[in-house]
Every structure is written in C-alpha cells, then in structure tokens.
Amino acid sequence: MATRNIAQLLGKDADHLLNYKSKTIPKEQIHVPNPDFVDQIFVPSNRTPQTLRSLGALFGNGRLANTGYLSILPIDQGIEHSAGASFAKNPIYFDPENIVKLAIEGGCNAVATTFGALSFASRKYAHKIPFVVKINHNELLSYPNKADQIMFGSVRDAWNLGAVAVGATIYFGSENSTRQIMEVSKAFEEAHELGMATILWCYTRNNAFKKDGVDYHTSADLTGQANHLGVTIQADIIKQKLATNNGGYKALNTGGSSYGKLDERIYTELTSEHPIDLCRYQVLNCYNGRAGLINSGGESKGASDLVDAVTTAVVNKRAGGMGLISGRKAFQRPMKEGVDILNAIQDVYLDKSITIA
C-alpha cells in the first residue's frame, strides 16, 4: 500500500497525522524500532541467550520480519468477552485452528491466544508461527462480573506448548492489582529463565477513573504510568490502549483527593493534545522505547474498521511505537477481509515514507 493510498484512507485527517512534527519529546531520544533492535536493546540487558533467540523468532516472522516492528493477532476474547459474544459474527473461530490460520495468512509475526487453543494446534503449527500464550484471564462468568485476572495455567506449560513468549494482563488501579503485579512478576521471571519473551497487557481499571462524564482509563498520564510499572517488572513488550485524552491525575486530584503525584510539565511540555504526542508519552514511559509499545486494535465497529486500524497504526508508528496487536477487527469478519485488515496495518510499518514525528 503506497502512502497516497494511506492518505486517501485517512481522508481529512491525512495531513494532521502524516505531516505532524512533534515539539514535545525529541524523536532522537526515542529508541525507535529498527532491524537491529534486539542487538541494540536486549543484548546488553539481562535477557538470556534463549530469550534472545525467542525475541529473534518473534521479530523475524511474517510480513514485518526483520524490520523491528510487530503485528500480532490476539484472540483471547473467548474468555475475556465470552465466546458467544466474540465469535457469533464468524463462528469458524470457535475452532482454534482457524485462529492460527488467520495469523499465518495475515502475515503476522505471532499469534497470541489461550492455553486451550494452542494445545490443539501446537504440534501442527508451533514451528510455523511464533506462539504467545496468554497465561491469565478475566473469566466473565462469575456473577456479578469483576475486574480480576487469574492464572489459567503455568509458565512451564506455555513453554511445553512451544511458545516463544507469554502474555499476561494487569489491571492497574483495581482492587486486585497488587496481587496481579506479584503474580505476573514471578511468572515473567520464570518465563525469562526458560527462555521466553514477555508481553504485558497493561490496562488501567477502576470506576473512579471515570469522572464528571469523562473516561480517563485511556488518558496518557494514567496509561503512561501503567506502562512504567509494566516495564519495571521486566515486560519486554507493552500492550496498551491508544491514549485518547489526558489529565487523569489532574481530574482525580480535586476536592480533598491527593491521588498519586503529578507535575504540570507532563501536560505543558511532555504532551500536547495531538494523538501522536499522547502516544509518545506512552512510549516515553516504556523506558524511551527500550520496551516496545504495541497499541491495541480495539473493538470492531464494522465499516470504519479499516480506516480506524490504519489510523491507529500511523499514530503508533509516528510516535515511536513498535506495532499493533489487533484481533476483533480481523476475526469478526470473513477471513479474507480479516487478512486485508492485518495487511493494511502492516503496510503502514513497511512504508518508509511514514516516518517518526
């Protein structure tokens, strides 16, 4: 896909997104994804040779192979959002083999899904596409539903399935976050010992983060701090929702509240209202991009999915991010159309004319 086609897809937002020059964090300070990213960033780290090999496998597969960018297909929604609600639009994905097939046909670096799904696919596909095993979930059958992530299997079991990486979610800000941080921290330590990479689904979750009619779960300041906590427990890659606003800390520090800590320069110097700058603050909190930021693809909204996916990819790339992890936009439609969505995302990262802002 050429840049002009991407510009056509972006429509009236093309100039705003493709030609923007950031005046917040200089791009020279960001560790931008590149073909030598593993050598430059992870070789000097404490990651073992086995983990480096797993990272090499992750970065070396699919249409984005050896670019430093990632396109991952995540399908764990059968647990997180319930199977019926997730797969009713396209029931072929009740069969986990089709999940893996979509990732392969879509040219993804990896497929991220559940213990159960990969247990039925591992012997046939583990050598054909890198596996990321999601080791914890928020099961959605308890009544009332609650925001908690519990372990669904062991790190050792993920390794036995042939995984190159494990993925886990922490709901930062929730009443269960302390336990989740301790559990995932131990799991990531074991994963690195066994030679697997680590990916953290790094989400904020607390009803208090909605204030005066504004939802701050995706504010740059709160998600940025969640990212910083995530890299502290040695996540190699951070999965985060694209920032849509800012000022979560400021909104929660009103009246008699003294929630967290803030510095006005977060809002006046380190960010602006531009979506690329909001995303760059997320990258900044990933140790200036040493841990790659992959943004979520978000829910499927139907006809606008292609434009929405390309828009998110452009913002992520120009901010200094590492790619997209997009599921529902791809699997909640016929497979051929899903492949087209995944390829359109990848085309943004392959297009050398789309540069860091």
Image (tube, helix red, strand yellow):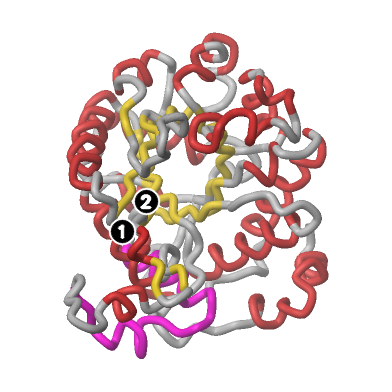
Which amino acid type is marked by label 1?
A: Ala
**Real-space Cα separation, disc 2 to disc 1, in angstroms:** 6 Å
Left or right: 244 in relation to 158: right
Which label belongs to residue 152?
A: none
Q: What residue do we see at 52% from left, 74% from top? A: 276
Q: What residue do we see at 21% from left, 52% from top? A: 232
Residue topped by disc 1? 226
* Earlier-in-chain disc, 2 versus 1: 2
Which amino acid type is marked by label 2?
A: Cys
* Quarter of the rendering containing residue 247: bottom left
- Residue stretch rendered in magenta on the structure: 261-285
Left or right: 268 in relation to 331: left
**Image x and y of residue 193, in percent:** 22, 27
Q: Is residue 181 visible?
A: yes
Looking at the image, the residue that sits furthest to the front is: 144
Marks 2 and 1 close (CB-CB < 8 Å)? yes
